[in-house]
Amino acid sequence: LGLLFFAIVSETLVTSILKELPRDESVIDVVRDVVRDHNEDEARHSLFFTSVLEVIWEQLSIRQKDAIAPLLPEFIAMFLEPDQKVLYRSLCSIGLSAQEAGQIWEETYPREIISAGIRASASPTLKRFKRVGVFQTNAAQDAFEKKRLTLEPE
């Protein structure tokens, strides 16, 4: 069940760059075309996995929902948070000290900016979760609030 919901999250998180890049005329045509094609494939995957979510969620017991719900914001974060370790190692590999790498991370990725970016990118997935009733469980509400992944009022 956890793996299925991991797939649902990954396949419904279409990043904004996939939507915007095909319209960016500063990018060469062949790259824009490839990304446009990829985005069309991702849109089909997203629709399919949204359907899976709709069917599966209503069939889960309360116990199963309480077990799965706290994993969902963790899965979202896995996909959307910048990889601090990779950036840190990369900066150190070009000769920066650990302190300098840490300072660059702090200045480049303030926590609130990261959180806002994740919320924006995850918004379509969060809306799907809301529509099927994921947030109706206390476990989900607590887990999503802890990760600062709540939907903005419309």
Image (spheres, rainbow, N blue to C red):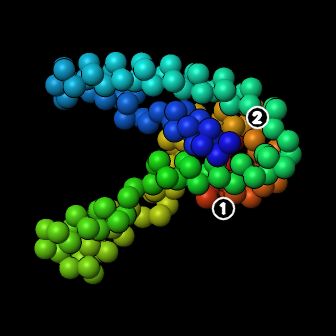
Q: Position of residue 91 (x, y in %)?
A: 21, 67
Give the residue at x 76% y 34%. Answer: 57
Q: Quadrant of the N terminus?
A: top right
79, 148: nearer the viewer? 79
Disc 1 vs disc 2: Cβ atoms closer than 8 Å? no
Give the residue at x 50% y 19%. Answer: 44
Drawn side of residue 33 relative to residue 146, left or right: left
Choose top left, top right, bottom left or bottom right for residue 128. Answer: top right
Residue 123 visible in rendering: no
Q: Position of residue 108 (x, y in %)?
A: 33, 62
53, 117: nearer the viewer? 53
Drawn side of residue 41 relative to residue 100, left or right: right
Give the number of the disc on residue 146.
1
Element assignment for label 2: helix
Which residue is identified by label 2? 57
Kindly identify the amino acid type of the residue bearing the numbered disc 2.
Answer: Trp
Mark toward the viewer: 1 or 2: 2
Q: Position of residue 48 (x, y in %)?
A: 59, 22
- Sequence-earlier tag: 1 or 2: 2
Kindly identify the amino acid type of the residue bearing the numbered disc 1.
Answer: Lys
Q: CA distance from mark 1 to mark 2?
A: 22 Å
Choose top left, top right, bottom left or bottom right for residue 49. Answer: top right
Q: Quadrant of the C terminus?
A: top right
Give the residue at x 17% y 69%. Answer: 93
Choose top left, top right, bottom left or bottom right for residue 85. Answer: bottom left
126, 3: nearer the viewer? 3
Element assignment for label 1: helix
Drawn side of residue 47 relative to residue 36, left or right: right
Give the residue at x 45% y 25%. Answer: 42
Vertical relation: 152 (above or below) 31: below
Mark 2 is surrounded, within 10 Å at the Cα level, by few (under 14), some (14 to 19) or many (20 or more) other residues, namely some
Residue 67 visible in rendering: yes
